[in-house]
Amino acid sequence: MSATSTRRSARPDVKPTERQRAKPALALLSAAGIAALCWTATAGADMRRAEFQSEMQRIDNEFDAAKARCDSYGGNAHDICLAEARGNLQVAKAELEERKTPSTRTRYKVLVARAEANFDVAAEECDEGTSAAKDACVEQAREALARDKAAARKRQNNR
């Protein structure tokens, strides 16, 4: 017996040349399948990007509307209104980023944005007081900011 006759084929009815022709076809089919999967994943990412951009545009439009409403106020009320509008803008952007890529880091950024927005509004509200009362009010706002940031760090580290 020769060496070729002792070797068994996995499929005796298929000649080696037919098996060789089937390999490129199988490779082509698997490549087409992988390409189709990649295309659908990319299409989904584009849709998310478009949704993200439309939400960002909505947030900017809401900020512009809030800023226009603030123009009807005068003095410190105008400053407080603008601080609230800017704070809402920053918090909304941070929340949108957190929805886009949820993680402990983006959640931390949302909590910090809220804390800073609260501080900015409180600091503007303190402007109405006298010198000593204003200083005490601002100090309380700073303490609240530090407390909120520490709570956010603690929450981030616990996860």
Image: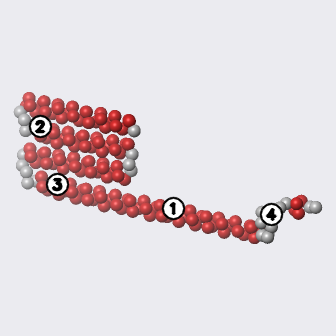
Q: Which residue is mark 3?
A: 66
- Which residue is at 25% across, 33% downward? 147
Horizontal side of residue 140 vs 131, given as left or right: right
The mark nearer the N terminus, 4 or 1, is 4
Q: In terms of secondary structure, where does tag 1 sit? A: helix
Q: CA distance from mark 1 to mark 2?
A: 55 Å
Q: CA distance from mark 4 to mark 1?
A: 36 Å
The mark nearer the N terminus, 3 or 4, is 4
Horizontal side of residue 48 vs 146, given as left or right: right
Disc on res. 126: 2
- Give neighbour class at mark 1: few <14, some 14-19, many 20+ (Cα, 10 Å): few
Disc 4 residue type (three-letter): Ser
Residue 38 in percent (x, y) is at 51, 61
- Give neighbour class at mark 2: few <14, some 14-19, many 20+ (Cα, 10 Å): many
Image quadrant containing the C terminus = top left
Q: CA distance from mark 4 to mark 2?
A: 88 Å
Disc 2 residue type (three-letter): Cys
The image quarter in which residue 46 lies: bottom left
- Give neighbour class at mark 3: few <14, some 14-19, many 20+ (Cα, 10 Å): some
Disc on res. 2: none
Disc on res. 38: 1
User: CB under 8 Å between callouts 1 and 2?
Assistant: no
Disc on res. 9: 4
Residue 123 in percent (x, y) is at 15, 38
Disc 3 residue type (three-letter): Ala
Disc 1 residue type (three-letter): Cys
Q: CA distance from mark 3 to mark 4?
A: 77 Å
The answer to whether 22 is drawn above or below residue 126 in the figure is below
